[in-house]
């Protein structure tokens, strides 16, 4: 199994995200024949947190849910999963985070060690994520911010700097029967559909400043 890898550039603000090289969510999974073109940008603001923007070339995306932590994967959704290493968890099964958003900007966000028994982020933490979505004529996008303060509440101290590594994966999904599809950035090689598989996350390294 070859692991996907990416460089996460240091940025000063989310405004720089689209100057970065995009990652592509282009592995079609579990019998998916067609899935809308999906890609994204991830940057790191030192001593602050991660900025993420994902874009899906899909017109009139299915978007029923409006509340936080609603099952947006039943709509058309884009997702980002992250796992960090910390001293606190070095010898135990590590925690990973999932962020799932639809075109209404409704965000499902949780953390835990496996697919079940996950802890949902609070409304106050959702405010820190500042999740937003934008619908255009031929695409929609979602943006969010993942502050280090929230990560360190889960993991304890994280010394994230140039050269630091973590693992992640990014997804496009709809469980709605009429448009059902699944796609990932890093390939998942299982028969049963599940994105909650950290062993298939790709590698990411924080890689200094973006050019220009």
Image (cartoon, rainbow, N blue to C red):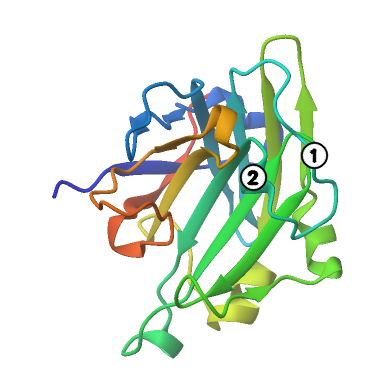
The 10 Å Cα crowd at callout 1, few under 14, some 14 to 19, many 20 or more, is some
User: What is the secondary structure assignment of the residue under circle 1?
Assistant: loop
Height in image: 27 above or below 8? above
Instruction: Using the rendered view, name the quadrant where residue 140 is placed.
Output: top right
* Residue at the (27%, 43%) spot, across then down: 4
Q: Is residue 174 left or right of residue 183?
A: right
Quickly name the residue at label 1: 64
Quickly name the residue at label 2: 74
* Residue at the (34%, 38%) spot, across then down: 29
Q: Are marks 2 and 1 in contact (CB under 8 Å)?
A: yes
User: What is the secondary structure assignment of the residue under circle 2?
Assistant: helix
Q: Is residue 131 left or right of residue 32?
A: right
Residue 19 percent across, percent down from the top left: 56, 23
Considering depth in this image, is 115 or 165 the residue closer to the camera?
115
Residue 141 percent across, percent down from the top left: 68, 28
Considering depth in this image, is 72 or 164 the residue closer to the camera?
72
* Residue at the (38%, 51%) spot, across then down: 193
Residue 100 percent across, percent down from the top left: 63, 50
Outermost residue to the left: 1
Height in image: 152 above or below 136? below
How many discs appear?
2
Residue 148 percent across, percent down from the top left: 63, 66
Q: Is residue 190 left or right of residue 36?
A: left
The 10 Å Cα crowd at callout 2, few under 14, some 14 to 19, many 20 or more, is some
**Disc number placed over residue 194 in the picture, else none:** none
Height in image: 139 above or below 54? above
């Amino acid at each position: 199994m070859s692991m996907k890898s990416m460089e996460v550039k240091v940025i000063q603000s989310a405004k720089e995200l689209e100057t970065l090289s995009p990652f592509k969510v282009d592995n079609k999974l579990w019998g998916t024949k067609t899935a809308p073109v999906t890609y994204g940008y991830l940057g790191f603001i030192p001593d602050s947190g991660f900025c993420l923007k994902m874009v899906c070339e899909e017109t009139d995306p299915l978007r029923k849910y409006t509340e936080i932590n609603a099952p947006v994967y039943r709509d058309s959704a884009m997702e980002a999963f992250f796992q960090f290493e910390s001293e606190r968890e070095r010898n135990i099964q590590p925690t990973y985070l999932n962020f799932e958003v639809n075109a209404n900007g409704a965000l499902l966000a949780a953390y835990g060690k496996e697919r079940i028994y996950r802890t949902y982020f609070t409304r106050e933490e959702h405010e820190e994520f500042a999740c937003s979505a934008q619908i255009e004529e031929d695409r929609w996008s979602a943006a969010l911010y993942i502050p280090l303060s929230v990560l360190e509440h889960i993991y304890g101290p994280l010394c994230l700097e140039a050269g630091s590594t973590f693992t992640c994966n990014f997804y496009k999904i709809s469980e709605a029967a009429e448009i059902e599809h699944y796609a990932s950035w890093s390939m998942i090689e299982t028969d049963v559909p599940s994105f909650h598989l950290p062993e298939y996350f790709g590698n990411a390294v924080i890689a200094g400043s973006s050019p220009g």
